[in-house]
Amino acid sequence: ARLAEHRPVLQAVAQAIDAALNECARDAVLLRDLGYEGPILPALPASGGIDFDTLPPLDALAPPSRRNLILVKGYHGWAGRALHVLSAIHLAAPHLRDYRIRVQLPADPVSEMADLMRASDGLDIAPEPWVPDHGAAIRRMREARMMVACSISDGIGTTLLEAMALGAWPIVSNTCCAGEWL
């Protein structure tokens, strides 16, 4: 465990479970390191994955090179690091003025930073509210050129899987197990 204070809690959980279902093979190694000795099932996304029959075919979508929407996962706190993503966007602002940047489900400090960036950098950046149904989230993702998510701890994010399935370029932190799924 990266955070030493979490190790005793994780070890207690590892001793209390009967079977493990992880999103990534790397998690099985971590679980064994915490003392777990039980069965480990094959890796499976927590969301269940993507049902491609419910998505529009890629050839029905605008090619990513013609899309001008950048989606940013707006979590910042225990694991999410959206403010770091916004800092990178600020540094690249002169090159991003032709893009719409939408920060999904931002924490208050992230919304405030987006507002400051809109005013100071001249970017079309705004918070994007929660959408009540999955179809709306998919419609938003199919318009995206890229999706950016930064976290100190993650499995295989549903947003990452949706981005890959809909042709949006995923940019994720190394803590995600995207490499296993790619």
Image (cartoon, rainbow, N blue to C red):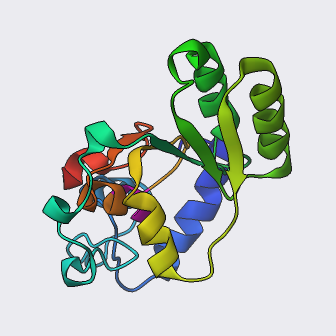
What percent of the width, then of the height, locates residue 24?
29, 59
Q: Quadrant of residue 125?
A: top right
Based on the picture, tell me whether residue 157 belongs to the magenta stretch: yes
Q: Nearer the viewer, residue 123 or 24?
A: 123
Q: Nearer the viewer, residue 181 or 131?
A: 131
> Is 70 displayed left or right of 130 in the figure?
left
What percent of the width, then of the height, locates residue 102?
61, 47
Q: How many marks?
A: 0
Q: Which residues are magenta?
A: 155-160
Residue occupying the point 42% across, 70% down: 138
Q: Nearer the viewer, residue 62 or 162?
A: 62
Farthest residue to the left: give it.
59
> Is 37 displayed left or right of 16 in the figure?
left
> Is 88 displayed left or right of 112 in the figure?
left
Residue occupying the point 63% across, 58% down: 8
Q: Quadrant of residue 41?
A: bottom left
What percent of the width, then of the height, locates residue 181?
21, 55
> Is 175 displayed left or right of 116 in the figure?
left
Residue 139 against residue 71 in the figure, above or below: below
What percent of the width, then of the height, locates residue 134?
48, 79
Residue 156 visible, this angle? no
Based on the picture, tell me whether residue 12 belongs to the magenta stretch: no
Residue 165 visible, this angle? yes
Residue occupying the point 58% across, 13% down: 94
Q: Quadrant of residue 12?
A: bottom right
